[in-house]
Amino acid sequence: MSTRRDFIKLGGAAGLAAALPRESGAATDGRYPVVTVAPLPGIAKGATLAFTYPDVRSPALLMRLGEEAAGGVGPDRDIVAYSTLCTHKGCTVGYKPERKLLICPCHWSTFDPAKAGMLVIGQASQHLPQIELRVERGLVQAVGISGLIYGRHTNIVLAR
Ligand code: FES
């Protein structure tokens, strides 16, 4: 699994961004930060990438599922990202590529990343918050959240 730090060490984003066409996903309304997660060409089918959003206390996971997904970006609309804090009691969910599901190890709540984080089975009563993505100049960026991150009264937003 790669991290954002690994991406920064590679240092290739600027050159890649200049060479690639613009493609948009979710729009940003200014309430959330815009965070670059990875260059689009560096995300292979089946890859996962841990990052944080909208702040460093909020773990998230980007996945390229290999099949079109709700809210997916990229040429195959198969790149999605979610908060990894389970909506039941906040344990960290993990992606099981063989099942294409996000599963919580605490009480086995199971979420479908191809269907906007929909709860499939388990103790949770809310879907997993989906990180809204866009592709801008060849870079996959996080620009918002759909759903409330576990333990929050509100998701952190930027001061206007
Ligand atoms: S904390 Fe995830 S199912 Fe209970």
Image (cartoon, helix red, strand yellow):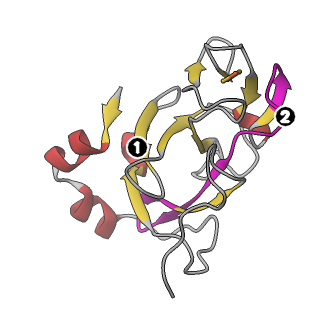
Q: Is residue 138 visible?
A: no
Q: Foreground: 105 or 9?
A: 105
Crowd rating for badge 1 (residues with CA inside 10 Å; few <14, some 14–19, many 20+): many
**Image x and y of residue 111, in percent:** 74, 28
Residue 112 lies left or right of residue 137; in this view the side is right
Please state the extent of the stretch shown in magenta in the rendering: 119-142
**Image x and y of residue 50, in percent:** 41, 36
Which quarter shows the N terminus? top left
Q: Which residue is mark 1?
A: 51
Q: Which residue is mark 2?
A: 125
Distance from disc 1 to disc 2, alpha carbons, whole Å, reads: 25 Å
- For residue 75, above or below residue 118: below
Is residue 98 on the magenta stretch? no
Which residue is located at x 53 percent, y 64 percent?
Answer: 156
**Image x and y of residue 90, in percent:** 60, 32
Dot 2 lies on which element? loop
* Number of marks in picture: 2
**Image x and y of residue 32, in percent:** 53, 70
